[in-house]
Image (spheres, rainbow, N blue to C red):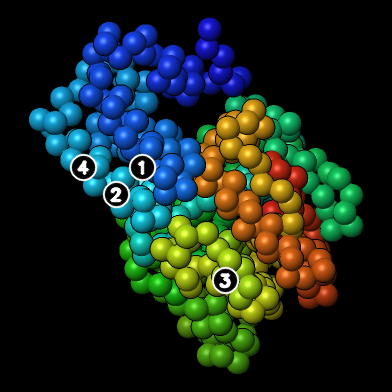
Amino acid sequence: MLVGLPGEAVTEKNLKIDDIMIGSKKSKNGELLELIAWGRAELSRAGIEEGQEECERILMKLLGCARSAVYLEEHELAASGVCERFRELIEKRIQRIPLAYLLKEADFWQETLYVDERCLIPRPETEILVETVIREMKTQAAKSKGCHSRPGSVIPAEAGIQTGVNSSGNPGSGSPIKTFGDDSISSFSFLDIGTGSGAIAVALLREFPNAQGTLLDISAGALEVAGENLRRYRLEERAKLVEGDIFNFFGTRDSGLGTRNEDPTRGASPEGRVPVFDLIVSNPPYLSEKDWKEIQEELKFEPRKALDGGKDGLDFYRRIIAGAKDHLTSGGLLALEVGGQAGPPIPTGTAQSAVVRHAVKSRTSSSAERARFNKNRALRGLDAPSSQAETVSKWLHDAGYDNIQRFNDYLQVQRVVTARRHS
């Protein structure tokens, strides 16, 4: 009997070749199984774990079907050109080209996004940032109204990020959050710094139908990808794409942007005014020089500008913290993803890795890719006596921000830091 994770459809998530195939002679898809076996063996020889999962994802894309249908339906592989295309993709994957780039898509939060080599591939860890922001914005809205959020589908506190630590290191807990669009929250504006594929912005715009987003990136190519994803979900009317560096966009009080207007149009930047937002969110580059020398092969195909955080990995945090206060409304939220402190990677093929894979809800990376990413994340903790979360929290405190909090990911690694501009 097949047993799946809670709430998981067995036919979609837990089917294995041995569970379906009573014998190759009896299988109607013997050619398919041989193709998967070949692909799995080739990936294994190249040192790529979870070859079965990757082969299935490739076939799902090529056949345009769900995972169960890959096995349970008959397919004319040779006649349709699937065999040839499958082998081509496996050969490229062996070169350690990320699977998301080969398939031109990555699943993030509740969306399937277009991605290519012009942008960083969205990571499951960044879903923690999105989840934190959604909860914080809803909590703030509920406080402003003097009531609780209306009932809806929720993510239980036990699922992960709901448990965090504040700036003093004391455990804290968050409120459950809904997982569908919430139009009960009044209009607010946000800035997504280093938007890349637009993953964070798209998730927030879909969650909050009254929100307006500004997507900032120094890469014109990345902004083109973000624009494609905005159009995919018909969000372009509520979003603005801005090409520029943090320094140029934030500027200083005498940079030509003018002095800060205490009540400008939110998110707007008319002449003589500094644009302000209710929320500034960012997953900035945070690999240090040392990290870059030890990264996994797949990361070498991704844009270095989206990963390289300077000598100590903290360059962009310095810039953001220094400039963000002048661009947040009174009480506005600043939310940052940070590199995790040292921690052992979760072995693949274990019950624990399966639980994490289920909790993260993302199909963007295989469990093996996430374990390797966790290993790189652990390396980041070796560069300094304190974690990036602790360092960033201290800088926020020294800069005069209020309500500084740190939140853990599903592996209990500090992953997100939030703070508010003094009211």
Residue drawn where x is 15% and y is 25% of the image: 76
Query: Label 4's element?
Result: helix
Disc 3 to disc 2, how far (Cα)? 26 Å
Taking 136 as reference, is 36 left or right? left
In terms of sequence position, does the residue under pointer 1 or pointer 2 come before the other? 1
Which residue is labeled 2 in the image? Answer: 91
**Circle 2 residues within 10 Å: few <14, some 14–19, many ≥20:** some
**Circle 3 residues within 10 Å: few <14, some 14–19, many ≥20:** few
Q: Residue furthest left?
A: 79
Q: Is residue 330 above or below residue 133?
A: below
**For the image shown, how many numbered marks are present on the structure?**
4
In terms of sequence position, does the residue under pointer 1 or pointer 3 come before the other? 1
Q: On residue 85, which mark appears?
A: 4
Which residue is labeled 3 in the image? Answer: 293
Q: Quadrant of the C terminus?
A: bottom right
| Image depth: mark 1 or mark 2 in front | 1
Which residue is labeled 1 in the image? Answer: 42
Q: Are marks 1 and 2 in contact (CB under 8 Å)?
A: yes
- The amino acid sitting under disc 2 is Glu
Q: Is residue 18 above or below residue 374?
A: above
In terms of sequence position, does the residue under pointer 4 or pointer 3 come before the other? 4
In terms of sequence position, does the residue under pointer 4 or pointer 2 come before the other? 4
Residue drawn where x is 81% and y is 66% of the image: 386
Quadrant hosting residue 173? top right
Q: Are marks 4 and 2 in contact (CB under 8 Å)?
A: no
Name the spot of residue 265 as percent of width and height, x first.
54, 68
- The amino acid sitting under disc 1 is Glu
